[in-house]
C-alpha cells in the first residue's frame, strides 16, 4: 500500500509532468506527497578555473549570487505549481527545501516513503548549471543501497 510519495521538484519546467504523475498516484492510493527541492550549493558555487587578476573575485561572486537567485526563483515556481496541483486535486502535501548533497538528502528521505517520483532531467540543478549526465543513475544507485534486499519466496 502506498501512503507516502517523495516528489523531486527539480525545474519548474519538468515539475509539471512529475507533479501531475505524483498527484494522480496520490489520488488513486490516498497517499500524502512530499515535494523535495534541493539546493546543491557546492555545484552552484563552482565556477571552474579562473584567471588571476583584478576584478575576477567580484565577477565570480556576482555569478554565484545570480545563480542562487535563479535557483530560488525556480524553486518558488516549482513549489507554487506543486501546491496548486495538490490543492486542486485535494491531495495532502508538504514541501521540503534542503541544502546539501542531493543524493544524500534523497537517500535519507526515501526510507520514510513508499514511492519516489523524479523527472528524467533537471533533478536538482534548476536549469542553472548543467546536470551531470549520470545523475539519474547515481540517484537510483544511491537509493538502491538504502533498500533492503528482496526476500525470496
Image (cartoon, helix red, strand yellow):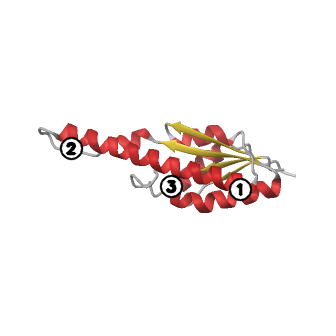
Disc 1 designates what residue?
88
Residue located 70% across and 40% down the image:
111
> Disc 3 versus disc 1: distance between alpha carbons?
21 Å
Q: State if disc 2 and disc 3 touch (CB < 8 Å).
A: no
In the picture, the disc for residue 11 is 3
Residue 44 lies in quadrant: top left
Residue 147 lies in quadrant: top right
> Disc 3 versus disc 2: distance between alpha carbons?
28 Å
Q: Earlier in the sequence, mark 2 or mark 1?
A: 2
Disc 2 designates what residue?
50
Which of the two marks, 3 or 2, is nearer to us in this view?
3
Question: Please, which residue is most extreme toward the left here?
Answer: 54
- Residue 34 pos. (x, y %): 67, 44
- Residue 119 pos. (x, y %): 58, 58
Q: Of helix, strand and loop, which one carries label 1?
A: helix
Q: Of helix, strand and loop, which one carries label 2?
A: loop
Q: Residues within 10 Å of mark 3 (few under 14, many from 20)?
A: many
> Disc 2 versus disc 1: distance between alpha carbons?
48 Å
- Residue 141 pos. (x, y %): 59, 49
Which of the two marks, 3 or 1, is nearer to us in this view?
1
Residue located 75% across and 58% down the image:
25
State the residue in front, 36 or 120. 36
Whether residue 46 is visible, yes or no, is no
Q: Residues within 10 Å of mark 1 (few under 14, many from 20)?
A: few
- Relative to 68, does residue 137 appear above or below in the rendering? below
Q: Earlier in the sequence, mark 3 or mark 1?
A: 3
Q: Of helix, strand and loop, which one carries label 3?
A: loop
Which of the two marks, 2 or 1, is nearer to us in this view?
1
Amino acid at each position: 500500500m502506498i501512503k507516502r510519495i517523495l516528489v523531486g521538484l527539480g525545474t519548474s519546467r519538468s515539475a509539471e509532468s512529475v507533479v501531475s504523475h505524483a498527484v494522480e498516484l496520490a489520488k488513486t492510493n490516498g497517499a500524502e506527497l512530499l515535494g523535495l527541492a534541493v539546493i546543491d550549493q557546492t555545484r552552484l558555487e563552482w565556477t571552474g578555473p579562473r584567471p588571476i587578476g583584478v576584478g575576477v573575485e567580484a565577477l565570480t561572486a556576482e555569478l554565484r549570487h545570480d545563480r542562487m537567485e535563479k535557483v530560488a526563483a525556480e524553486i518558488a515556481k516549482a513549489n507554487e505549481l506543486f501546491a496548486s496541483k495538490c490543492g486542486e486535486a485535494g491531495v495532502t502535501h508538504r514541501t521540503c527545501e534542503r541544502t546539501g548533497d542531493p543524493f544524500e538528502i534523497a537517500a535519507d528521505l526515501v526510507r520514510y516513503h513508499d514511492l519516489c517520483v523524479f523527472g528524467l532531467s533537471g533533478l536538482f540543478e534548476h536549469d542553472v548549471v548543467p546536470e551531470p549526465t549520470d545523475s539519474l543513475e547515481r540517484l537510483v544507485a544511491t537509493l538502491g543501497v538504502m533498500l533492503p534486499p528482496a526476500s525470496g519466496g
